[in-house]
Amino acid sequence: MEYSKTLWNYCTEKQITFLYASSAATYGSGAQGFDDKSDIALLEPLNGYGYSKQIFDQWVERQMDSPAHYAGFKFFNVYGPNEYCKDSMAIMVFHGYRQIRENGVIRLFQSHNPSYKDGGQLRDFVYVKEHMRCTHVHAEPVQRKWAVQCRNWEGTKFPEAGGGRFPCYGVGG
């Protein structure tokens, strides 16, 4: 986070655009909603990654001086080429494909909510090129922006996201 602060301060001093990646992980369970309309201090991330993004978002919000234009992007489940480079952070469909190839079955995420079966949790999958278009549009220095959401606004269950894709690879059914 210290490096991000250094970049922020440099962009503030030079009055140049500052774009940074926050994360939808800051929304946690979604109890406060999946937007930043309410006080972001009320958001409760569920893991260290989301918490680290939340700390920086809150730091940005407290700054009296800022770059001429800035935007914090709340990225959702981004996928695209070279998922293998992301290791354990790769998209679920990538992991599911590998599991099917290796074991013939997919291990679904365990649900801790009785309203959702294992694997029934909703995810908002967005292709990396769509995120790039969103980032490009909001990078224009029209105004200062706080949180920009780049998402498709459609929750998809993992079996729906993966099930329709695996047969084209000659695995699953």
Image (cartoon, rainbow, N blue to C red):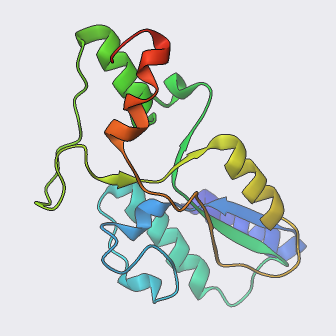
| Residue 108 appears left or right of 15 | left
When asked about the image quadrant of residue 3, the answer is bottom right
- Position of 88 relative to 169 (above/below): below
Outermost residue, left side? 114
Query: In this orientation, which residue lies closer to the viewer: 38 or 61?
Result: 38
Residue 47: image location, x then y, percent: 31, 57
- Position of 100 relative to 149 (above/below): above
| Residue 94 appears left or right of 145 | left
| Residue 119 appears left or right of 166 | left
Residue 112: image location, x then y, percent: 13, 56
Residue 24: image location, x then y, percent: 47, 62
Q: Quadrant of the N terminus?
A: bottom right
Which residue is at 34% across, 66% downward?
28
Residue 124: image location, x then y, percent: 47, 53
Query: In this orientation, which residue lies closer to the viewer: 87 or 124?
Result: 124
Which residue is at 75% across, 81% downward?
66
When asked about the image quadrant of residue 10, the answer is bottom right
Which residue is at 72% across, 78% downward?
145
Q: Quadrant of the C terminus?
A: top left
Which residue is at 54% across, 78% downward?
59
Marks counted in the figure total 0
